[in-house]
Image: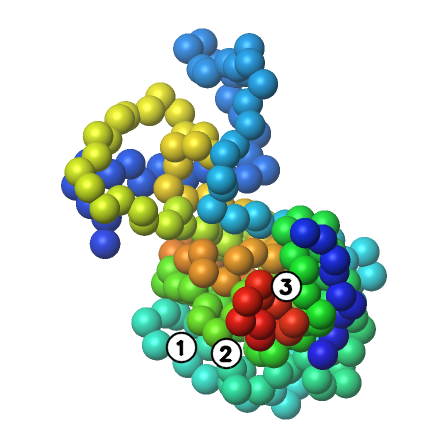
Amino acid sequence: MIGGRRKGGADLPGRNRGTVAIGAVPSTGEGEMQKSKGEVRPIFPAGAVVRYRNEKHEDIPLDGLEFFPNFGSKTESTSQHRNILKEARFQALAGFLEECVKDYLDNVYAYEYEGFEIVHAWVNRAPLGGFQRMHYHGNSVISGVYYLKADPNFSAPLMFEKPEMNTQPYIAIATREQTIFTANQVAYPSETGIAYLFPSQIKHGYEVPTKGGERISLAFNVMLSGIGLFYRL
């Protein structure tokens, strides 16, 4: 196991499918919403997405890797039964991602655990027009994606979808602008050398097709050991 012990305590009618683009330049037109006069704090967010930049990013040759088409999308991937990070060519990247995972577990969620391991890792690539349906990862606590090759101006952004929690009828209220409190999707730019970590149960994908060039990423799943209050794993 990797990592040290951390001590510490289909769209519905009328549903607003707005998207917030992270990193977008805010507009300042007349009638636009202004900064609240009060101190705004989110309560019980669905999860944290953390962005990490690899200042020592280097191109990794993909020669000899076998890719297979993915069902329901215009992408292809290496086998998900094979941990690609165990190959020598990915050794430096594996070290960087392990540092990101430890920071995420210790300093974002403050989980108590004995160890962690990146249990699955595979390479995805999408050509011009490539897309990936919204999905989530099972048998995993934390998931992540690292961009081996992506251009934020042309590569499809990484999208996250707000979890459905409606069990009773609700009132749908129109909004003038989308905010993190009202949007049902959030988009993060795809860029070479950037990693995103997020809870595995949050739906993600990129349904907006890639506009140009190849979009190549490495996806991975993380499991923890020594967790639980009564029935420990």
Distance of label 1 from label 2 (alpha carbons):
7 Å
Q: Residues within 10 Å of mark 2 (few under 14, many from 20)?
A: many
Q: Which disc number belongs to residue 77?
A: 2
Secondary-structure class at tag 2: strand
Which amino acid lies under the numbered mark 1 shown in the image of this protein? Asn
Residue 6 is at least partly visible in this image: yes
Which corner quadrant holds the N terminus?
bottom right
What residue does disc 1 label?
70
Q: Is residue 54 left or right of residue 217?
A: right
Which corner quadrant holds the C terminus?
bottom right
Tell me what residue is drawn at x 42 percent, y 10 percent.
31
Tell which circle, 1 or 2, labels the residue nearer the N-terminal end: 1
| Nearer to me, 152 or 163 | 163
Distance of label 3 from label 2 (alpha carbons):
14 Å
Q: Which disc number belongs to residue 146?
A: 3
Residue 108's place in the image compared with 182, above or below, is below
Secondary-structure class at tag 3: strand
Tell me what residue is drawn at x 74 percent, y 58 percent.
7
